[in-house]
């Protein structure tokens, strides 16, 4: 039941925010081109608003009562809904990189599979930080922040999928 609700949550926010979102600025596209497929960089849309124009997912309170550690949406820096990223303020390149990893994950996995893997990762690991989709995004973000020369985020995510790391 949670996965269809999560997929609906993503679809509703992606649709609602997509109409007011803007494309990535040209400079960010240029800097990130060595890591991301140009079609992902062209397709992504960004909304910057504080507070975030995003509601809490339906089951968040229940998850917290069960002892699972999941951040409040109102406190996160950014959140990704397919190809739409909502951020509380202009994103530094490291945070944008992290959210773009999720854009690639959504594209490769599809919304239903992404939400199922995200929910399973939270339930099995007990916290946001333990979710394999997040661990992948943090890992690739860290490589970028360390200055590792261009690597293909798509190939890295495909590797995680093939190796059943999600």
Image (cartoon, rainbow, N blue to C red):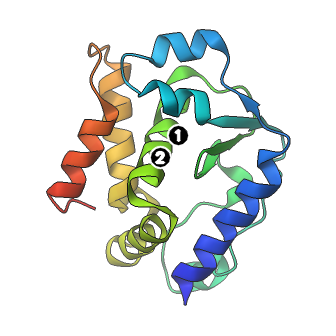
Between 160 and 144, which is closer to the camera in this rendering? 160
In the rendered image, the vertical position of residue 41 relative to residue 135, given as above or below: above
Q: Distance between the residues labelled 1 and 2?
A: 5 Å
Task: Work out which quarter of the rendered image holds the N terminus and state it.
Answer: bottom right
Q: Residue at 65% x, 49% y: name it.
A: 76
Relative to 31, 52 lies left or right = right
Relative to 104, 95 lies left or right = right
Residue 35 in the image: x percent, y percent? 36, 23
Label 1 belongs to which residue?
Answer: 99
Q: Residue at 78% x, 37% y: name it.
A: 21
Between 130 and 26, which is closer to the camera in this rendering? 26
Residue 161 in the image: x percent, y percent? 24, 56
User: Is the residue under label 2 in contact with that under label 1 (CB below 8 Å)?
Assistant: yes
Q: Residue furthest bottom?
A: 1
Q: Tell me the element at label 2.
A: helix
Task: Work out which quarter of the rendered image holds the C terminus and state it.
Answer: bottom left
Image-quadrant location for residue 87: top right
Between 138 and 72, which is closer to the camera in this rendering? 138
Q: Residue at 84% x, 46% y: name it.
A: 51
Relative to 100, 132 lies left or right = left
Residue 22 in the image: x percent, y percent? 77, 30
In the rendered image, the vertical position of residue 2 relative to residue 93, given as above or below: below
Q: Residue furthest front?
A: 39
Q: Tell me the element at label 1.
A: helix
| Mark carried by residue 64 | none
Q: Residues within 10 Å of mark 1 (few under 14, many from 20)?
A: many
Residue 164 in the image: x percent, y percent? 18, 63
Q: Residues within 10 Å of mark 2 (few under 14, many from 20)?
A: many
Label 2 belongs to which residue?
Answer: 102
């Amino acid at each position: 039941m949670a996965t269809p609700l999560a997929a609906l949550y993503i679809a509703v926010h992606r649709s609602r925010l997509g109409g007011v979102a803007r494309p990535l600025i040209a400079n960010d596209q240029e800097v990130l081109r060595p890591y991301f497929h140009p079609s992902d960089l062209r397709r992504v849309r960004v909304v910057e608003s504080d507070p975030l124009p995003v509601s809490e997912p339906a089951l968040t309170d229940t998850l917290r009562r069960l002892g699972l550690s999941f951040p409040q949406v109102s406190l996160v820096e950014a959140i990704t809904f397919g190809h739409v990223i909502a951020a509380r303020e202009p994103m530094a390149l490291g945070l944008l990189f992290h959210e773009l990893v999720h854009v690639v994950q959504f594209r490769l996995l599809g919304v239903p599979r992404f939400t199922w893997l995200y929910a399973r990762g939270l339930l099995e690991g007990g916290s946001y930080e333990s979710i394999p989709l997040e661990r992948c995004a943090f890992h690739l973000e860290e490589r970028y922040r360390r200055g590792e020369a261009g690597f293909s985020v798509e190939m890295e995510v495909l590797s995680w999928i093939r190796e059943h790391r999600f």
